[in-house]
Amino acid sequence: MGSGGVPVAKALISTAGMNPETDVNIVVAGEGAQTAAMLRSKQVDALSQFDTQYAMVENAGVKLRLLDTKEIDRYPSNGFLALEETLSARKKDAVGLARGYAKGTIFTINNPEAAVRILYEVFPELKPTGKDEATAIRDDTKVLQARITNWKLEKAGVKRWGENAEANYAAYAVFLLKWGVIKEKVDAKDLITNELIDEINKFDAG
């Protein structure tokens, strides 16, 4: 209940015309099969989680209807954080890490099933139990496909891997201030840097 997901849920409830403090009761719904079980037993009526979680719930046999989230769709999510002195002193390491991540992203977008098989090979403990391999690969590929939509450059309105869209961060900072997640206005320029992006993208995406 202390996660950033709570104010996001409250914001979406408000934009739907309800009072998040009196019209709904926000509870922890767990992951995957646990969430699906809570939906089936009517312990929860709606979910506010994220792309891969919804795919996991559908893999567990519960069909979901996605609601309009245009207001928050362009806000940033996962990313790399570093101290300015780290980027200065270990620039080569930072570029290498981000370039490797970009290459892995491109590979996965183009061959998600192979990415799942590699995951099982490197981290066998993550291979689902109680399913045959074909079903496990099919289900986890579906989960990856849900995230792939949000990995694509056009989704963030950028042209280079790792690039930060300042407008998206500025809008997110306004949103976080409005909902009390942060206490004072923050300039997007203080949150991001694109200084390394050209160097990160010096590889053959093909």
Image: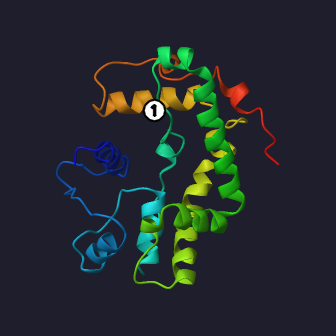
What is the residue that sits farthest to the left in this orientation? 22
* Residue 162 visible, this orientation: no
Q: Position of residue 145 (x, y in %)?
A: 59, 63
Q: Is residue 46 above or below residue 206?
A: below
Q: Is residue 44 left or right of residue 86?
A: left
Q: Residue at x 36, y 57 (%)?
A: 48
Seen from the viewer's position, the closer of residues 34 and 126 is 126
Please, what is the three-letter code of the amino acid marked with disc 1? Tyr
Pointer 1 residue = 172
Q: Quadrant of residue 185?
A: top left
Mark 1, other Cα within 10 Å: few <14 / some 14–19 / many ≥20? some
Q: Secondary structure at mark 1?
A: helix
Q: Position of residue 181 (x, y in %)?
A: 29, 32
Seen from the viewer's position, the closer of residues 181 and 105 is 105
Q: Is residue 177 above or below residue 128?
A: above
Q: Is residue 114 left or right of residue 129?
A: right
Q: Residue at x 30, y 42 (%)?
A: 7
Q: Is residue 183 above or below residue 29?
A: above
Q: Position of residue 54 (x, y in %)?
A: 44, 65
* Residue 167 visible, this orientation: yes
Q: Residue at x 82, y 49 (%)?
A: 206
